[in-house]
Image: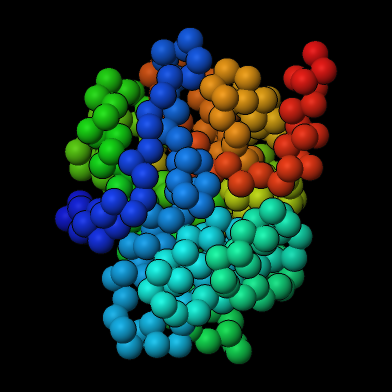
């Protein structure tokens, strides 16, 4: 786990430059609550970890700029943090990343380095890519990043005393590791449940088998969660803090996107709706981490159109 003192230090580094996001009930259902990280300035929780990591780095480490590998949300966080630090940012992005996210990355001043999905995944495994210079901020497996994510757990421990379970989307595991580390230290009775799209659910497969297993991965519109495999070191972290992992059918994620719009007036991307989709299968008191709202407009229109025409 990430030490609680490290998470508290990350909170000090971040200060008031991230939003203490609201915790709201899901419509009239007081059993389910939503932690709205989609309201952060970049539309995603990733700003917490990016600011924590860049501010923890030395001047010498930042001399050549900052690099990350991201499909969009961490890229925006790192671009924001690098701009604030006055250094260049370079982002290794998979081809096929949502245009809406790429536009925001470039608007924040970062250079986009497009690669295949396989090369992007390899850059995360290798913690960088030849020819792309700078201080590498891993979008997942970086302790300063996870400590920044853990500030969400501090807020939940303070603001949600009556919950039984927190449901967290799992992409690489950095969000879960941070939040769960804080909660296990402060509220050890709270269960930690992860949600992945069933098209790429390596953690659910690993927990079911008791060890990492190969899975059949298919890319989907849920671009901010799920993956072909667990990143190095993340199985050991997950096994320590995750109580249950759920693989969610894409149709249920689409339903959750529509429900968030209709009942909570919240725009969520696929990863942001995953937690609600998993929570709706449960009967205990849940907080769902709505991790982001950066969904491509054309994808969003396709998903909500059944509700709009009903």
| Residue furthest left in the image | 5
Q: Residue at x 45, y 71 (%)?
A: 83
Along the line of sight, which residue is nearer the eye, 103 or 9? 103
Along the line of sight, which residue is nearer the eye, 254 or 59? 59
Vertical relation: 158 (above or below) 109:
above
Q: Is residue 72 left or right of residue 21?
A: right
Q: Residue at x 56, y 76 (%)?
A: 90
Q: Is residue 247 left or right of residue 3?
A: right
Vertical relation: 88 (above or below) 202:
below
Vertical relation: 138 (above or below) 28:
below
Q: Quadrant of the C terminus?
A: top right
Q: Residue at x 27, y 20 (%)?
A: 162
Along the line of sight, which residue is nearer the eye, 248 or 271? 271
Residue 106 in percent (x, y) is at: 63, 67
Residue 71 makes an appearance in the image: no
Residue 293 makes an appearance in the image: yes
Check the image and tell me how it is coloured.
rainbow
Residue 37 in percent (x, y) is at: 45, 41
Along the line of sight, which residue is nearer the eye, 216 or 154? 154
Snapshot quadrant of residue 156: top left
Residue 212 in percent (x, y) is at: 53, 54
| Residue furthest top in the image | 28
Q: Residue at x 73, y 51 (%)?
A: 219
Exactly how many numbered labels are in the figure? 0
């Amino acid at each position: 786990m990430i030490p609680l003192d490290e998470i508290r230090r990350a909170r000090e580094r971040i200060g008031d430059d991230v939003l203490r996001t609201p915790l709201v009930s899901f419509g009239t259902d007081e059993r389910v609550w939503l932690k709205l990280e989609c309201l952060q300035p970049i539309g995603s929780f990733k700003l917490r970890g990016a600011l924590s990591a860049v501010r923890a780095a030395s001047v010498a480490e930042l001399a050549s700029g900052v690099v990350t590998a991201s499909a969009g949300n961490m890229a925006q966080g790192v671009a924001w943090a690098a701009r604030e630090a006055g250094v260049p940012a370079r982002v290794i992005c998979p081809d096929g990343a949502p245009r809406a996210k790429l536009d925001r990355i470039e608007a924040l001043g970062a250079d986009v380095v497009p690669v295949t999905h396989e090369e992007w995944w390899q850059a995360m495994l290798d913690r960088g890519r030849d020819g792309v210079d700078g201080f590498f901020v891993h979008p997942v497996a970086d302790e300063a990043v996870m400590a920044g994510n853990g500030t969400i757990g501090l807020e939940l421990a303070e603001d949600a005393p009556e919950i039984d379970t927190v449901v967290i989307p799992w992409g690489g595991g950095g969000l879960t590791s941070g939040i769960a580390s804080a909660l296990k230290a402060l509220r050890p009775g709270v269960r930690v449940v992860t949600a992945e799209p069933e098209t790429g659910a390596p953690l659910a497969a690993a927990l079911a088998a008791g060890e990492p297993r190969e899975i059949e991965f298919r890319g989907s519109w849920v671009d901010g969660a799920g993956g072909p495999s667990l990143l190095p070191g993340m199985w050991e972290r997950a096994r320590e803090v995750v109580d249950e992992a759920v693989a969610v059918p894409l149709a249920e994620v689409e339903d959750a996107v529509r429900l968030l719009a209709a009942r909570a007036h919240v725009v969520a991307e696929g990863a942001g709706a995953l937690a609600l989709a998993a929570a709706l299968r449960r009967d205990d008191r849940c907080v769902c981490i709505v991790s982001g709202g950066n969904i491509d407009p054309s994808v969003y229109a396709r998903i909500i159109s059944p509700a709009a025409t009903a």
